[in-house]
Image (spheres, rainbow, N blue to C red):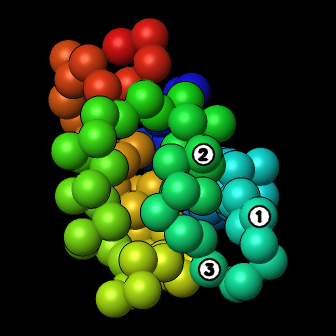
Amino acid sequence: LTPLPQKDGNGKLGLVEFNVLWNRIRNYLFDLDKSGSISAYELRLALEAAGYRLNKRLHELLITRYAEPDLALDFDSFVCCLVRLETMFREQPFLSLKAGG
């Protein structure tokens, strides 16, 4: 998994960056029960498919931060979560939570 291309480091998504993110979302959105949101279990599957191998504690922190009280993430929260992970691993590549990293 390669990080989102960021030419100017401004923290905003340009057209190219949005296209990369959108393709990742389409490829890794695992709404297995077709509920319109992603459960904690579906989030783990989606992140693993995207190349992230997160430990249990980090997965729980993501759920706490981005999920609703029913432990499901809506589309907006899922995108925010993905962007945050991409940014975190791009800026701190020494983190060993990502597969191959």
Q: Amino acid at mark 3?
A: Ser
The secondary element bearing badge 1 is classed as loop
**Residue name at image x 38 percent, y 25 percent:** 98
The secondary element bearing badge 3 is classed as loop
The secondary element bearing badge 2 is classed as helix
Q: Quadrant of residue 88?
A: top left
Query: In this figure, which residue is indicated by the disc labeled 3?
Result: 37
Q: Eyeballing the image, is 98 above or below 50?
A: above
Q: Eyeballing the image, is 39 above or below 44?
A: below
| Residue 8 percent location from the top left of the image | 35, 48
Q: Earlier in the sequence, mark 3 or mark 1?
A: 1
Query: In this figure, which residue is indicated by the disc labeled 2?
Result: 45
**Residue name at image x 29 percent, y 34 percent:** 55
| Residue 30 percent location from the top left of the image | 71, 58
**Residue name at image x 33 percent, y 66 percent:** 63
Q: Amino acid at mark 1?
A: Leu
CB contact under 8 Å: marks 2 and 1? yes
Mark-to-mark CA distance, 3 and 1: 9 Å
